[in-house]
Image (cartoon, rainbow, N blue to C red):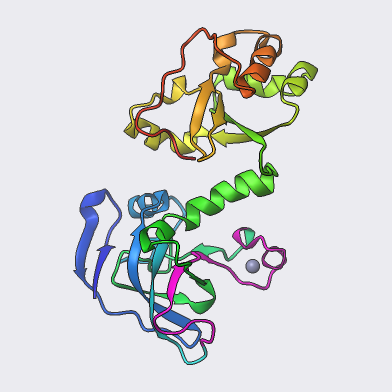
Amino acid sequence: MKAVRFHEHGGPEVLKYEDVPEPKVSATEALVRVKACAMNHLDLWTRKGMPGVKVPLPHISGCDIAGEVAAVGDLAARVKVGDKIVVAPGLSCMQCAACLMGRDNQCRQYEIIGGYRMDGGFAEYVRIPEVNAIPLPASLSFEQAAAIPLVFLTAWNMLVNQARVSAGEEVLVMTTRDPCEPCRGVETSLRDPLMQTALRGVRLVRVDIDVFEEDLAEIKMPASRYPGFFLLSLDIRPADGIDGGEWDEDIAQNIAPVLGAFVRRQYTLRREPWTTLPGSGIRL
Ligand SMILES: [Zn+2]
């Protein structure tokens, strides 16, 4: 089969489109004919190489896979040849306390298909444990399905499990950047009763924007001028943002009255006007 592999770590030039032996499935695995595979930031990190993480080379990246089952192992009973599926990329021991509590991403043996040790979906075929196959609803195309797994889990965990957001609630995202004085000031002032009052009924989600530094550079958005608070639109894109640093000292006194109005979309005056983000905004 054809696949994109890298034999050494480095930039995009190390990627090779080449002939590779077709994967052989074990008894409880399924062979998937890849129809779509999204690109995740993990693919870039793996290709570049990460300190302390050993990736067996050559390696095929690609964690977010949608496709059709092409073959199944002798003991595989959950999927059959021809099934349209999206691949849940997480692999874990399924026996430890974290796994049994449904927090398999905290398993000591947690691994991602296409991530570090197991080959991924930048290929014609990929082998997966059959338990990782999720039936694809008819309403989703392969491309749409492949856009979901890893990023969806991150956003879902952040909003639903951590922030416990329910339908109809407002979500405010506070970005942090260390070392950044305004962000630290905002963080400290969150305990102030004025801030607590302003944020009543609002779910606060904190994001470390250092993680997104390369993405910000790519769209020419200087990380140091990134707003401290975002109001998210329904499609989880920033509808508006304000910078905690706009309000100098006494952050609680200065920002709390503004924050309440901002969340209720009544905020019209600011020292530094909000400019729409380039393109369609930052996706979290
Ligand atoms: Zn486990």
Please give the count of numbered marks on the rendered protein. 0
Task: Say if the magenta span includes residue 85.
Answer: yes
Secondary structure mostly seen in the magenta stretch = loop
Q: Position of residue 256 (x, y in %)?
A: 69, 15
Residue at 26% x, 63% y: name it: 4
Task: Say if the magenta span includes residue 227.
Answer: no
Q: Position of residue 213 (x, y in %)?
A: 42, 34
Residue at 45% x, 57% y: name it: 53
Residue at 64% x, 14% y: name it: 258
Is residue 129 shown above or below 87?
below
Is residue 116 shown above or below 168?
below
Q: In this view of the protein, can residue 142 be seen by the observer?
A: yes
Of the pair 157 and 83, the residue shown nearer to us = 83
Of the pair 242 and 119, the residue shown nearer to us = 242
Of the pair 94 and 47, the residue shown nearer to us = 94
Image quadrant assignment for residue 202: top right
Q: In this view of the protein, can residue 60 be seen by the observer?
A: no
**Residue pushed farthest right?**
193
Q: Quadrant of the N terminus?
A: bottom left
Q: Position of residue 221 (x, y in %)?
A: 38, 26
**Residue pushed farthest bottom?**
74
**Quadrant of ligand 1 in image:** bottom right
**Residue pushed farthest front?**
139
Image quadrant assignment for residue 232: top right
Q: Range of the magenta residues? A: 76-105
Residue at 54% x, 35% y: name it: 208
Q: Is residue 117 left or right of residue 58?
A: right
Is residue 199 shown above or below 170?
above
Q: Position of residue 84 (x, y in %)?
A: 42, 73
Q: Is residue 84 left or right of residue 193?
A: left
Image quadrant assignment for residue 153: bottom right
